[in-house]
Amino acid sequence: MASTVLIVSASLLALFFFLHSADADVGSNVFSIQSYGAHGDGRHDDTKALGDTWAAACSSAKPAVLLIPKGKKYLIKHTTLSGPCKSSISLMVKGSLVASPERSDWSKETIRHWILISGVTGLTVTGGGTIDGNGKIWWQNSCKTNSKLPCTEAPTALTFYSCKNLKVEYLKVVNSQQIQISVEDCTDVMVSRLSITAPETAPNTDGIHITRSRDVEVTDCMIKTGDDCMSIEDGTENLHVKNMVCGPGHGISIGSLGDHNSEAHVNNVTVDNVRLYGTTNGARIKTWQGGKGSAKNIVFQNMVMDNVWNPIIIDQNYCDSSTPCKQQKSAVEVSNVLFKNIRGTSASEEAIMLHCSSSVPCHGITLENVNLTVKGGIDLKHEHPWTLEDVEK
């Protein structure tokens, strides 16, 4: 496991090197936002300029680069960058894209997204620059921050929808209004060398959210946020997460699945070589009662937990509600889950909780070479600080 930590540390050094020095040649077929009327001062609205630059680059018959120049800040309101494009395209963010600080700039129709990139094949988003969601005003008006306020939606900073052969790399994503990066209905995706940050108190700011997507790889990322470092949702298949540092945050979560009696499926997920610092959860699977479907063939391995409140948790009775949830017989089936080579410290007295359904018990759950010290210094190898409910052998 010592080599695991070294690998993660080396990855982070590489990450910061590239984030601060990503000055690779942008190529010859370049479409700079500055050439399409942008101000780049962080005060004037550059949304139209970004849209016009995208339209020109996307219509190019040969591979194109949309350039966001270094040293500039571009104030952007809700925008959709749509494909298909005539050739492959790179969004080269060397400067900063900054969200409008005014909530009134979003309507009911646009409130779920800040920057939405849709229907593009062969897209690369890179450059070492910053995507800044300017989320403070949204956090202050969240019902999770102030229970007296009504619960309302907030934008996801960067959403990729129905994209194929997608690469997202060498970026800083900060202070999203809600979710930081969402990958939805995409195939053949590589996400790598990202620094994703928001305050620990910023509600619902999941780092990377994956749903209805397959053949996805996430590597060499550092995530500090106010919710899940990664949330892995319905329709995710063939996901490999490797070399990540997470914390603060809520850990790496599969789910929640099956809410509102829905059907959900997650299959073939591997989380490998991850270090978690001070997170509320470590490796977590959470499903609602009343749902159906499956979460299967899941591996959490080579993980270090540093003062994590719930290092290992499966909860088939998840209830994110101010009132008790209704007891129901159906459930998302959880099976073939391996927790392997996991060590560290638990901030609570219960390091492992397998809280499975009484009607659809989880099965095929394996813990191998797990070495956790819980609050008070008890070594998990010798005592029993865990809860096991309705686990089939």
Image: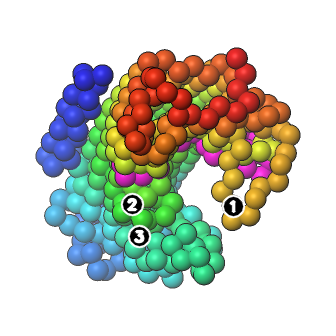
| Image x and y of residue 227, in percent | 47, 55
Do tag 1 and tag 2 residues touch (Cβ < 8 Å)? Answer: no
User: How many residues crowd mark 2 within 10 Å: few (<14), some (14–19), many (20+)?
Assistant: some
The stretch of residues the image draws in magenta is: 247-265
User: What type is the residue that disc 2 sits on?
Assistant: Glu
Pair 3/2: label in front: 2
Gap between marks 1 and 3, in whole Å? Answer: 24 Å
Q: Which residue is mark 2?
A: 200
- In the rendered image, the quadrant that contains the N terminus is top left
As drawn, 143 above or below 84: below
In front of the other: 187 or 101:
101
User: How many residues crowd mark 1 within 10 Å: few (<14), some (14–19), many (20+)?
Assistant: few
User: What type is the residue that disc 1 sits on?
Assistant: Ser
Residue depicted at 27% across the width and 75% down the height:
42
* Quadrant of residue 14 within the rendered picture: top left
**Secondary structure beneath disc 1?**
loop
Gap between marks 1 and 2, in whole Å? Answer: 21 Å
As drawn, 364 above or below 5: above
Residue depicted at 46% across the width and 23% down the height:
382
Pair 1/3: label in front: 1
Of labels 1 and 2, earlier in sequence is: 2
- In the rendered image, the quadrant that contains the C terminus is top right
